[in-house]
Amino acid sequence: MKSLPNLLLISGTGQNSGKTTLACRLISQFAIQFPITAIKISPHFHQSEPELPVIATAEGFTIYEETQHNTGKDSSRFLDAGATKVYFITATSDQQGKAMETLLEKIPVTTPLICEAGGLHHYFKPALHIVTLSKNKPPQKQISESADMVVEFDGVGFEPEVEVKWSGEGCFFLP
């Protein structure tokens, strides 16, 4: 398993568990200090994303660059939160690793990455893996054993509060 010390991974136990909200909060926090690249990986293939440039495509995945602000889509929310670059990947579960490898070839290795993805922890060891769960509904998925931190989302905030730091040497960490 490849280690990615510049990757902060956010996954969750189902829909509306606060994944995108947490990603946006962290992007906003860090974007003030340095450029952030954000990535959204979805197992749901959409008809097409004609307004988005295709970065790469192969059997089982397509990588787009999100360029549209204020659309309400998760990847657009990352741009609105201050990410310098945003990539949206649609990938089958077994191709998430290959899709990420393909994207990483186009990104400098020291770039801070914040990624919302459900299954990426099977392919990479991130610096931090935060799992969100909804306080208001039962989990649809199990909490990954690779999680460094589990937070509960009540629709507004997180418990415990999430505090993440960047080393300045290419690594995210919990203080």
Image (cartoon, rainbow, N blue to C red):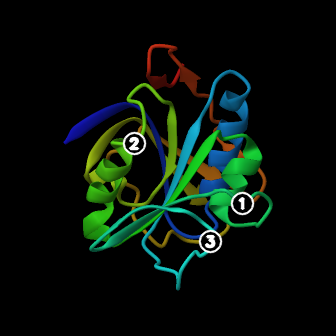
Question: Is residue 18 among the parts visible in the rendering?
Answer: no
How far apart are the alpha carbons under marks 2 and 1? 20 Å
Q: Amino acid at mark 2?
A: Lys
Q: Residues within 10 Å of mark 1 (few under 14, many from 20)?
A: some
Q: Amino acid at mark 1?
A: Gln
Looking at the rendered structure, the secondary structure element under dot 3 is loop
Residue at 29% across, 44% down: 124
How far apart are the alpha carbons under marks 1 and 3? 32 Å
Question: Is residue 27 among the parts visible in the rendering?
Answer: yes
Residue on which the image places disc 2: 106
- Looking at marks 1 and 3 on the same chain, the residue that comes earlier in the sequence is marked by 1
In the image: residue 153, left or right of residue 6? right
Total marks in image: 3
Q: Quadrant of the N terminus?
A: top left
Where's residue 145, x and y in %? 32, 49
Q: Are marks 1 and 3 in contact (CB under 8 Å)?
A: no
Residue on which the image places disc 1: 68
Q: Residue furthest left?
A: 1
Q: Quadrant of the C terminus?
A: top right
Where's residue 9, x and y in %? 46, 44
